[in-house]
Amino acid sequence: MDRRAFIRLSLLPVGAVGLAGCAGEESANNDGSSVDEDITETETAETATENEESEDSPAGGFPTYDLPMYSNWPPETPRTNDFVLFGHANIQILHEAGSEEVEEESPDIEDEENLLLVLPGYGFIITALWFQVGLWGYPWQGTLGNDSEPDGMETEAITMTEGTFVFHGSFDPDLFEETYADGFEVQTNDRFTIFEGEQGTETDGLAYAVAESSVVAGLQTGEGVEHQDVITTLNDAVENLIAETGRVRDTDDGEFLFESTGDADLVTGFWDVNGLEEEDLQTGDEPPDGSSELEENPVFNTVDSFVSVLTLPASEGGVGGDTVAARFAAVYPEGEVPSEQELREELVPSDTAEETAITRSDTRAHVMIEVSEDELERESVAAPNITGE
């Protein structure tokens, strides 16, 4: 398949709705267990197993996957917003999007039937934007995560959430200590090498930590951010990971969201948003076209939290399977879960999906579709190049 069609589809949301917030080791093992002492991130299984209404599982009756690597970072309590927002992307998609030539405008999201396919692109847009503008000042900025990294850096995916930015892959902590430590106070423990900038110097407001499977950095969110706040945010993220507490995934509902959607190439997540409002879906003073309609969407107007993901089909890069899979999991107040008809009408393309599965309970909903490569190419349309390359 020509993945440019997939990339264009993923970029649809940028012209329609800009998500607010943003500024804000590691993965579960392949057997779904907690991270080990080495904080090793691993790829999750491609296929889910149906859970036959097991009350012992947090997903109880919903499809289940291994917990994805990015789930180790979104905090349960917001650091920069009234809610927790996170995005995640396969780094190869970012590299290919940077070279993509597309039209200047993209359609309104409400004009698209394929909301389940488009929604994960929001997480990609936000993550890509912060990759471009939120890491200025770091000595490895422009090198880490690019398409020609030196030995000792091998980025596979990136995650943005609540004041932190995470690179997932394989990294050599010694390389960072030898090459990117000038102006930083360096501390080590049995899991991370931590680099804290010095207040009043060129490294004021900078702090990052390196493990063999990840690099996590405090985002540069704009003027007025205090040096100590960046350090506190980084330390909070690292300590939550080590203690396995204080994160979205450490709650029953959070575990359900991640376990029922699994690892993916594009991810958008909202936690504790308590119904999407116009101000949640804009970056400027004026609400973007389509935000009012999305707010009135019965799938989102009472939603407490949700995760929406998309996995790539087989392609030149060898990522993904034979079809595109889109998965959506959401948590609602008791008795306010949308009906199966509402979920189908608002999220599932009427004639696109080869397979569709909808599961509901008193407080949770899950929708999964599979789309053929040919159908995805047909549905893709031009969208702007957001990377500036």
Image (tube, helix red, strand yellow):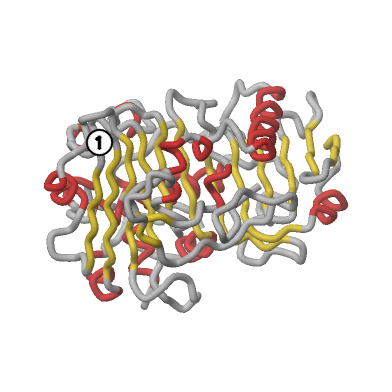
Q: Is residue 247 above or below residue 105?
A: above
Residue 289 seen anywhere in this rendered image of the structure? no
Q: Position of residue 112 (x, y in %)?
A: 19, 53
Count of picture labels: 1
Query: Which residue sits at x=73%, y=58%?
Result: 171
Q: Is disc 1 surrounded by few (<14), some (14 to 19) or many (20+) residues within 10 Å?
A: few
Tag 1's secondary structure? loop
The N terminus - image quarter = bottom left
**Residue designated by label 1:** 362
In the foreground, 246 or 62? 62
Q: Position of residue 261 (x, y in %)?
A: 40, 53
Query: Which residue sits at x=81%, y=29%?
Result: 198
In the foreground, 374 or 386? 374
Looking at the rendered structure, the kind of residue marked 1 is: Asp
Quadrant of residue 307 within the rendered picture: top left
Quadrant of residue 42 within the rendered picture: bottom right
Horizontal side of 217 relative to 132 (left or right) equals right
Horizontal side of 344 relative to 7 (left or right) equals left
Q: Is residue 100 above or below residue 26?
A: below
Query: Which residue sits at x=33%, y=36%?
Result: 331
Residue 364 seen anywhere in this rendered image of the structure? yes
Horizontal side of 377 relative to 198 (left or right) equals left
Q: Is residue 339 above or below residue 198?
A: below
Q: Position of residue 351 (x, y in %)?
A: 13, 65
Q: Is residue 316 above or below residue 223?
A: below
Q: Position of residue 69 (x, y in %)?
A: 56, 52
